[in-house]
Image (cartoon, helix red, strand yellow):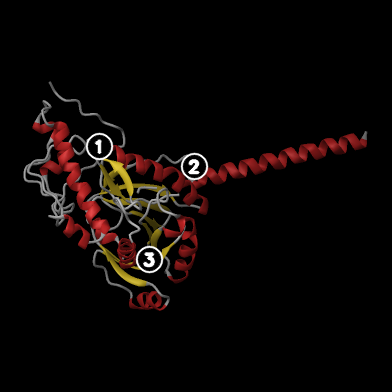
Amino acid sequence: KNRIMAEFLLIIGIIVLFSCLLLTLAALFYVSGIFHRVEIGTGKPPIGRVVIAYKFTKGPYKEAGHMFTELMKYTPNGYKTLGIYYDDPKLVEPDNLRYAVGTVLSENGSEIDDHVRKVMEDAGYTIFNLPEVSYVVKSSFPFRTTLSILIAVARVYPRLDQYIKEHKLCAHPFIEVYEGSTMYFMCPLAKQNEFYVEEAKEMRRDDDEDGDDIDDDSSLLSTSVVTGDISRDTSYMGSFVDGNVSDSDEDRKSESKEKSFSEECAAKDTKSVMKETEGSKVTVQDLTCPAGTNFQDSGFSSEPAITPQLSPTKEEEEENDGNESGSSFEEISMEKENLPAKE
C-alpha cells in the first residue's frame, strides 16, 4: 500500500513539474511577443540621417548574432544598434549573403563622442553615413528576450515581403534598428543605393566582373510590377525581401547594380500604373497625387501621376512634409483598401 501511494505521489509530482514547465514556456513566449500584433505600413523611419560604425561580412544571416554580440562589447548603453541585410536568402547561397551590423554614433547632426568613435575604429569598425529618407516600409516588434528576435524574424519578414509585393513598391535593403525594448524593421523607398556600404558595392562589382550576376542579378528579390508581365528586382532580409533612370544600357552598367535596379523599378512602377489606369473612369481626387508633387527621392517626378496604390492623405495634400527632396509618399493602411473605378 505504501508503495502504491509513493508511486501515486511521484506521478502527481511529475505532472506538476511538467505543468510548471509548460506554464513557464508559455509565459516566455508571451513576454517575447508571440501574440504581438504585427502591423505593416509606410511612414516616417525610426532613424533620421545617421553616422554609424559598422562591420561588413558575408555569410549566413543566422550568424549575425555573433556580430551583434561582438558589437555590444564596444557600444555604450543607450546607443542604437542596427543590421543591414542586402540579399534574399531564398535566391543567394548562405555563404554569399551580404550584411552589415553597426552602432549609431550620431543622428540628425548630433555631436559624435570622440572616445566612442576611437574605440570603435580601433576595434575594426568603419565609419559610414546613412541618408535621411521621408518614407519607408516599416514595422516594429517588442525586444524583451533573445527569443523575441527569432519570433520577429518568423512573423515580420513574411508580412513585409507580402506588403511590398501587394503594393508594387521598390524597397530595399532591409534594416533592423534596435532601440531599448523595441526593434524596428524598415525598408527605404528612396535613396536605396546610399544604404549600401562600400564593401557591399565592391562585392557586387566583383561579381559582375566575374560574370556571376546574369539576367537581372539573382541576388535581389524579384517581384512583379503592376502589368504582371515585367519583373523588377529588390533585395530583402529574413531567414526575407528582399531614382533617375539611366539613358542607356551602357550607363547602367557603369554604376552599381543596386542603384540601377532601384531606378528601373521606380520607373517601371510609374509606367505600369499609368498603363493600368488608362481608360478607367476615375476622378482626380480619388487617384492622383497633389499637383506639382516631385518625387526626387526616388528618382522620378509626377505632375500629377495616377496611382491606385499610393493615394495621398488629406494632411499631405495640405502641407509638404518638410523633406528636402519633396517626396510625398503617403501612409498606407495595413488593411487592404480597394479603390473601385467610379463609373
The residue that appears at 41% across and 39% down in the rendered structure is 37
The residue that appears at 50% across and 47% down in the rendered structure is 32
List the residue tagged with mark 1.
229
Asked if the residues shown at circle 2 and circle 3 are in contact, with their CB atoms under 8 angstroms apart, the answer is no
Q: Please state which of the two labelled residues, at mark 2 or mark 1, is closer to the viewer.
A: 1
The residue that appears at 26% across and 57% down in the rendered structure is 257
Q: x%, y% of residue 311?
A: 18, 37
Identify residue type, mark 2.
Ile
* Residue 313 seen from this side: no
In terms of secondary structure, where does tag 2 sit? loop
Front-most of 322 and 324?
A: 324
Asked if the residues shown at circle 3 and circle 1 are in contact, with their CB atoms under 8 angstroms apart, the answer is no
Q: Please state which of the two labelled residues, at mark 3 or mark 1, is closer to the viewer.
A: 1
- Distance between the alpha carbons at the discs numbered 2 and 3: 27 Å
List the residue tagged with mark 3.
103
The residue that appears at 28% across and 60% down in the rendered structure is 195
Q: x%, y% of residue 262?
A: 23, 52
- Distance between the alpha carbons at the discs numbered 2 and 1: 38 Å
Q: Quadrant of residue 282?
A: top left
